[in-house]
């Protein structure tokens, strides 16, 4: 095999490995159960019947005007943010303390999961 083909194969292997790491995060069982209790009933394509974090994030935003995200504070720590936008006001309200230690997480996905759970707890739902 010549040098060109070796480089080409290495690039293909790197690309395949990167794609494997780029899967969407599915919420935990606890989060999925809480979401269902709060009225989330969108059919999902996962075999586990749990939504992805991004789908639940979108549902919270579109159905309840609750915006959830995560942001880095230190080089290796992430915190969730939860904001509620009111239609009759021009500003948003931050829900919760900005840096509570119990919400400090190692990854963006862990912080987002934490934020999704806390946001779901804010919804009052009557069945």
Image (cartoon, helix red, strand yellow):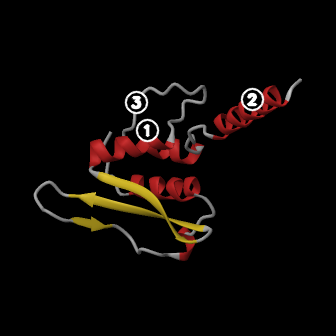
* Mark found first going from the N terminus, 3 or 1: 3
Viewed as shown, does residue 61 lie left or right of 15? left
**Residue 89 visible in the shown view:** yes
Residue 36 in sight in this render: no
With 11 as the anchor, is 79 left or right in this view? left
- Residue 70 in the image: state x and y as whole percent: 47, 59
Q: Secondary structure at mark 2?
A: helix
The front one of 5 and 14 is 5
Rendered residue at 46%/58% (across/down): 115
Q: Position of residue 80 (x, y in %)?
A: 47, 62
Mark 2 lies on residue: 8
Could you tell which of marks 2 and 1 lies nearer the N-terminus? Answer: 2
Q: Residues within 10 Å of mark 2 (few under 14, many from 20)?
A: few
Q: Residue at x 59, y 65 (%)?
A: 105
Instruction: Assess disc 3: are there few (<14), some (14-19) or many (≥20) residues with their C-alpha within 10 Å of its C-alpha.
Output: few
Helix, strand or loop at mark 1: helix
Residue placed under numbered mark 3 in the picture: 42
Picture residue at 47% right of the left edge, 46% below the top: 34
Q: Which residue is mark 1?
A: 55
Mark 3 or mark 2: which comes first in sequence?
Answer: 2
Task: Mark 1: give few (<14), some (14-19) or many (20+) Cα within 10 Å.
Answer: some
The N terminus: image quadrant: top right
- Cα distance between the residues tagged 3 and 2: 42 Å
Judged left or right of residue 39, residue 21 is: right
């Amino acid at each position: 095999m010549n040098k060109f083909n070796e480089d080409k194969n290495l690039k293909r292997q790197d690309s395949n490995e990167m794609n494997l790491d780029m899967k969407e995060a599915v919420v935990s069982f606890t989060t999925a159960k809480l979401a269902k209790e709060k009225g989330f009933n969108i059919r999902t394509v996962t075999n586990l019947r749990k939504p992805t974090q991004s789908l639940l994030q979108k549902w919270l935003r579109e159905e309840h005007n609750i915006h959830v995200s995560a942001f880095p504070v230190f080089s290796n720590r992430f915190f969730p943010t939860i904001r509620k936008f009111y239609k009759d006001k021009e500003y948003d309200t931050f829900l919760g303390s900005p840096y509570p230690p119990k919400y400090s997480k190692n990854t963006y996905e862990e912080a987002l999961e934490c934020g999704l759970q806390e946001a779901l707890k804010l919804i009052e739902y009557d069945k």
